[in-house]
Image: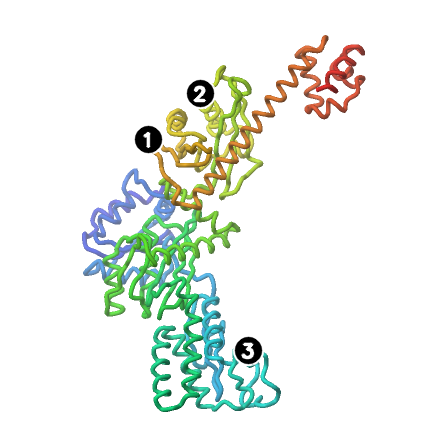
Amino acid sequence: MNTRLPYLREKTSKLTDSPGVYIMKNREGNIIYIGKAKNLKKRVTSYFRENPEHTPKVAAMVSNVFDYDFIVTDSEYEALLLECSLIKQHKPKYNILLKDDKGYHYIKISDGEYPKITVEKNKPSCKYLGPYTSSAVAGEAVSEVNRVFMLPTCNKNFPRDFRKERPCLNYHMKMCMGICSGKIDREIYRKTVDDAVEFIKSGSASSVKRMEKEMNEASENLNFEKAAVLRDRIIAVKKAAEKQKVINNGVESADIIGIAEFYDKVYISVLIYRGERLCDKAVFELEKSYTDILSDFMKQFYHGRQDLPKVIIIDHIPEDAELIQELLFNQSGRIIKLHQPQKGRFSELLKLAKNNSAEYAALKNSRTGKEITALEQLAKSLGLKHTPEYIEAYDISNLSSESIVAGMVVFENGRPLKKAYKRFTVKEQEYQNDYGSMREVIRRRLLHIVNQEGDEYFKRTPDLILLDGGTGHVHAVQPILEELGLDIPLFGMVKNDKHRTRAIASGGKEIQINNLQAAFNLLTNIQDEVHRFSVSFMHSRHRKKTYSSELLTVKGIGEKKLAKLMIKYKTKENLMNASPEELAKTAGLNSETAQRLWNVIQDL
């Protein structure tokens, strides 16, 4: 509880209704959060009102506010610009801060008479292109351009190393023009390097168009040798571009922003296409925000950038979309479209960007991209506030009214956590009753949470409970959660005629998940696992009960003596390996009874 709240509320009551920026500070006077508002009084009041419904992150920020400053602006757009500038300047703790996972990379065009094109980690002192946030993209661009324009990639220094040895294998494979032979004119080579640099800058489409024009001119001037070189180069450029076109499908200029969430982190990748080719990729790891993370990200990412696309592909239209577009327009002098695709090539590109984000999240958290995507899809389809880290699933299994049991399996971070599995013997249901059995099992399990009894897994509150069953099972169990005061999302797993997951049952409807492949596969795995676990327990119990019944037919063996034997030997195999003398000693039997018992055990 912040003891400064009365003072802060009093101060805020006199605040202006104008647009502006507010600057939250802690007791030491350090800036911990910066925000913008269309109406300063209304926005700041929302932080300090009584009984607020803050997220944990906002509540933590408010608890540390000692005072705040504000700056009035003439418009909300001016407030946006000021907010972006101040965040970059002060880097407050509770704002999202964009930090690339890796340093910048550059494409270097070396000095000298015969320059080479390479990738450098540090900013070169000579001519360069960049910076690039993705070393992989920069490296691929250099590899592609050297291959297409047949430029040397060796460590030789030209013209010093002319004609010192035969051209290497790259020359014979037509991957290098063989400059080491000393037969390539310096001006022709420099022109080739200039064309290669222009290809990196403008992309394959414009490069092909320019070279086709040069080829036609050379052909008209009867310079067939030059025309042939250009023809081969055009073919190489088109071939290199084919693998890009499989992905971008002719996208000339676009940024595609993909987001993946994993618990308290958000992972964002931006695929940057220029000139119909992927020219860069930026990746970010952010703390979850209580505001629209996409809106906050775009304002910081694009503020001050000059190389802006024609269209930005996103999975939803963010808050402050009009302000963001105004920001982009004022920086570029043209309208930049924010597009939320539903189908087509842009939808495929968005999926690609999201997969990149998921793979980055997986790398950071030692998971797979499919696991990250599955949990994210599951959270969104079920309307969960957070990605379910700890999932419990239950299934009832029985043979008629005999051996009624339940199995509980646990999936943590999308994977089975077998040491947390639990088995339940249904005690209160005399006859087969799935709803009653499920109610009994869930109540017994949840009481461990309420009373904090049992091992560490029994004490832990799951993020999601799944029942093997439909809406009826959910209706039967939901009152128990309410009675015990537990706010745990509860859903049923609905099966089809082939015992495969078909849908998810909520309180009054079914949620189809067939179109969410990753989430569908995860739920199918969970349902298969809980069914396997409960059925195996049921069969084990039934075999044990049948076995015990056979032993009770032996004259002189009652329930108490049988219990002593089972406690001592536990399994049928151990009993079969015991001698009559050992059986007699364990259960207190005479030699004749022990021998009869041993004979029955051997025949089972």
Instruction: Determine which residue is flagged by label 3.
Output: 173
Name the mark on residue 436.
2
| Three-letter amino acid code at the position of disc 2 | Gly
To which quarter of the image does residue 6 belong? top left
The amino acid on which the numbered mark 3 sits, given as a three-letter code, is Met
**Can I make out residue 30 in this image?**
no
Task: Classify mark 2: residues with Cα within 10 Å, few (<14), some (14-19) or many (20+).
Answer: some
| Residue 567 image label | none
Residue lying farthest to the top in this orientation: 555
Taking 221 as reference, is 190 left or right?
right
Per the image, label 1 sits on a secondary structure element best described as loop
Question: Any mark on residue 508, and which?
Answer: 1
Question: Residue 292, image x and y in percent?
Answer: 32, 51
Q: Is residue 238 left or right of residue 557?
A: left
Question: In the rendered image, which quarter contains the C terminus?
Answer: top right
User: In percent of the image, x 43 and y 66: which residue is there?
Assistant: 243
What's the distance in space between the residues labelled 3 and 1, CA to CA? 67 Å
Looking at the image, tell me whether mark 3 or mark 1 is earlier in sequence order.
Answer: 3
In which quarter of the view is residue 182 placed?
A: bottom right
The amino acid pointed to by label 1 is Gly
x and y, in percent, of residue 34 in the image: 32, 56
